Image (cartoon, helix red, strand yellow):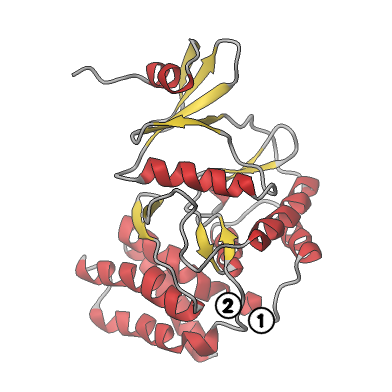
Amino acid sequence: MTREGPGAVAARLTGRPVTAVRPLSGTLAEVALDGGPVVVVKPGEGPGAVEAEAAGLRWLAEAGTVRVPAVYGHDGRHLVIDRVPQGRPTSGAALRFGRDLAALHAAGAPAFGAPPPGGPRDAYIGRAPMRNADGTDWPAWYAEHRVLPYLRRAVDDGTLRPAEATVIEEVCARLPELAGPAEPPARLHGDLWSGNVLWGADDEVHLIDPAAHGGHRETDLAMLHLFGCPHLDQVLDGYRQAAPLVDGWADRIGLHQLFPLLVHTVLFGRGYAEQALAHARTALAR
């Protein structure tokens, strides 16, 4: 069976003729449509990944806050979305992004762990499987569905030793006292590291590659801190102008980073485990 190229995929899913195809990084391709936009064709990471990403992009767009690529179509194996013309980071765009991110979170979700409407429960964060299961109590939900599954996988893989895992398990047991005041479920991007924040040519920020679900708004902010983000101070200023943060939120950044750090431990190895353990020990020392 001949493998279908990105141009053929784009033509089939959009119903428009293709005028040009240009490979991008990895398995992505940019496709120019006749009389229409330039789109990106992206293959899925695994079963349900395309459906989850498409539903996530639509759910984020539905809030009318942050900008995300429009979804032109998907077939379970490929996703066709708008291309975001690249610009450069500016402090003004960062300030607006912070306000828009606060509005996105305020759009809310039915429950912690709620998937986007029409999206599968079994989704992905990057290349790692991520199960969306509803919860009403954030500390218990975060421990059971975001920290412990990846901790157990890391121990099973030999990346973390069982004795080390007990440190993170103790943090999970103490989450009710460490998590700060209760907050309602926020509508999260869910994988908000700097690589998924695109600075557009229109001096606006666009978000891509969501692992969208209902969660705690501080988790998205902690992800922005994890690998750095241009003009992060302005992003946070804009956020706080729209929605003040609860006292002590900065002290909880490491707590919220346990989830992505353990995901990275499973995907990429020991270095991220060391970071997760350091955050866990800091949390326990508070």
91 with respect to 140 (left or right):
right
Amino acid type at mark 1: Gly
Q: CA distance from mark 1 to mark 2?
A: 7 Å
Amino acid type at mark 2: Arg
Write down the quadrant of residue 145 in the picture: bottom left
Residue 21 percent across, percent down from the top left: 46, 16
Residue 73 percent across, percent down from the top left: 46, 30
Write down the quadrant of residue 216 in the picture: bottom right
Q: Which mark is residue 252?
A: 2
Residue 29 percent across, percent down from the top left: 45, 25
Residue 8 percent across, percent down from the top left: 38, 16
Find the residue positioned furthest to the left: 1
Q: Which mark is residue 164?
A: none
* CB-based contact (under 8 Å), mark 1 and mark 2: yes
Q: Which mark is residue 248?
A: 1
> Relative to 30, is 132 above or below?
below
Q: In this figure, what is the number of numbered marks?
A: 2
The residue shown at (34%, 42%) is: 45
> Dot 1 lies on which element?
loop
> Dot 2 lies on which element?
helix
188 with respect to 94 (left or right):
left
Which residue is nearer to you in this view: 245 or 261?
Answer: 245
